[in-house]
Amino acid sequence: MQTISMLIGGQAVHAATTFPVINPASGEIFARAPAGDASHVDAAVKAAQAAFPAWSAKPDAERKALMHALGAALEAHMPELMRLVTLETGKPQGGLNGVGAGMEVGGSIAWTHVTADLELPVEVIQDNAEARVEVHRKPLGVVGSITPWNWPLMIAIWHVIPALRAGNTVVLKPSEMTPVATARFAELANAILPPGVLNFITGAAGSNVGPVMTGHPGIAKIVFTGSTATGKRIMANASCNLKRLTLELGGNDAGIVLPDVDVKAIAPKLFGVSFHNNGQTCACLKRLYVHESIYDELCGELANLARNAVVGDGMNPETQLGPIQNVMQLAKVEELAADARAHGARFLCGGQRKAGPGYFYEPTIVADIADGVRLVDEEPFGPILPVIKYSDIDEVIARANNSPNGLGGSVWSSDPAKAAALALRLECGTAWVNEHGAIQPDAPFGGVKQSGIGVEFGQHGLAEYTSIQTLKIMKS
Ligand code: NAD
């Protein structure tokens, strides 16, 4: 069985004990990872601090070239990384609408190259006879990255590449449930980067590795993707040295379908954006509001699609939806389903765990359900979609906005201009028209309200890994 290593200052590091990594398609252990502790956090931060002066002083063009080299290394190891992603997350190699391990690794490559090409030019605010005023972007120092289990490799790339591109050094900690593909990325990166520029540490479930990182005085910024509850703990802990924070947290995205849509044409698209990766994507559509005039027809179409989706082991090329990634998340989905049933909701299909090994749950469409029931109000993060009837557009926008979360939202209509005007009324970081959850490496993405702080991607995202220094040069 494979045992991964930590990587500190360019050296492979093991811990006194290891913890298991489970393949959710079988429920069996397929790898082990080092149970790091506070001493490993400390050593990784010291290595990153030691590497910072030379890395941040490197000419910009050299850092850019090294980021492109990382992209090329990912590409050269694509099949291997895809296999590791499927084994640890359960997501299919291909997946529903092509959203699977191939997209995770392919997206990682694309994001790396696009981010490598971003620039942070000096901004000139004033240049006249009296003075020249310039705004410079400077790296922060050591960035700590903490990632979740749903898109482990891609989210590590989203954190690490802009941090390095801007001249920071990094300590990267994956979720204890999915450290394996990220460990391989860290190895590949360490064959390219100077020692200490990217350090990789792991901690077992419930260990203090994450909290020690977020409270460490040697870390200048934490970039975190995960649940809102953990994000709040991190924010409290990070106050010790006023760490900079980017927090990408939970979402409970609403989609609103107007009565003018072609139901048959949009149903597969709505199904895809709600169920890809088994609903385990922060910006999946998680609450679907449908106008009463088309409610029954759309519910029927969605239920047919759910019944026919191919659920199975992600290594099987036919599979569209894999297992839920872990047994706790499966239990949460079961709990929300039971609560919805108790509140009289109508299950059009699915509604239970699949027999056999692994953490499989049937794709589930739930109708005749309203706001106030947990399945609507809480993020299920699994293959279950509540479909909620509405009659009045102003009222449904208020219902969509009546959430502590504000990651994404969408409006579906055959009149894109009308839909865009409504989408702008949604309280969320990204609003889509006739689409949901689609992101790209050059457009900012982030949450409002309790879905997060700050943005990732593009120029705006890169700037978050810097501080501003204003330089005023007097001329007279
Ligand atoms: P989680 O919050 O349980 O864990 C995320 C990471 O935080 C893991 O690495 C974990 O080890 C670490 N961690 C746990 N407690 C910590 C602490 N006290 N201090 C520091 N680190 C700690 O989240 P998860 O269950 O892995 O991920 C699912 C959640 O992530 C969902 O809510 C989902 O919506 C959200 N998510 C958001 C985005 C986004 O971009 N907004 C993307 C993906 C996932």
Image (cartoon, rainbow, N blue to C red):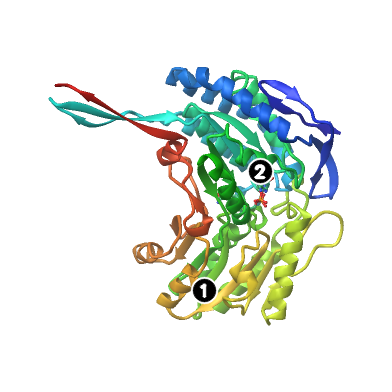
Q: Which circle's residue, 1 or 2, is located before the other in the chain?
A: 2
Q: Is residue 27 above or below residue 474?
A: below
From the top left corner, tell me how far across and down residue 213 is, in percent. 63, 38
Q: What residue does disc 1 label?
A: 290
Residue 51: x %, y % from top left = 57, 20
Circle 1 Cα neighbour tier, 10 Å, few/some/many (<14 / 14–19 / ≥20) = many
| Quadrant, the N terminus | top right
Q: Which residue is mark 2?
A: 211
Q: Is residue 423 visible?
A: yes
Could you give the CA–CA distance between mark 1 and mark 2, rounded to whole angstroms? 42 Å
Residue at 83% across / 41% down in the picture?
20
Front position in the image: 54 or 364: 54
Is residue 80 visible in the rendered image? The answer is: no
Q: Is residue 423 left or right of residue 240?
A: left
Helix, strand or loop at mark 1 = strand
* Amino acid type, residue under disc 1 in the picture: Val
Q: Say above or below: 353 vs 456.
A: below
Q: For disc 2, does the CB lie below 8 Å from ligand 1?
A: yes
Q: Is 200 located above or below residue 433 in the figure?
A: above
Q: Is residue 153 left or right of residue 420?
A: right
For the residue carrying disc 2, how many other residues have a C-alpha within 10 Å: few (<14), some (14-19), or many (20+)?
Answer: some
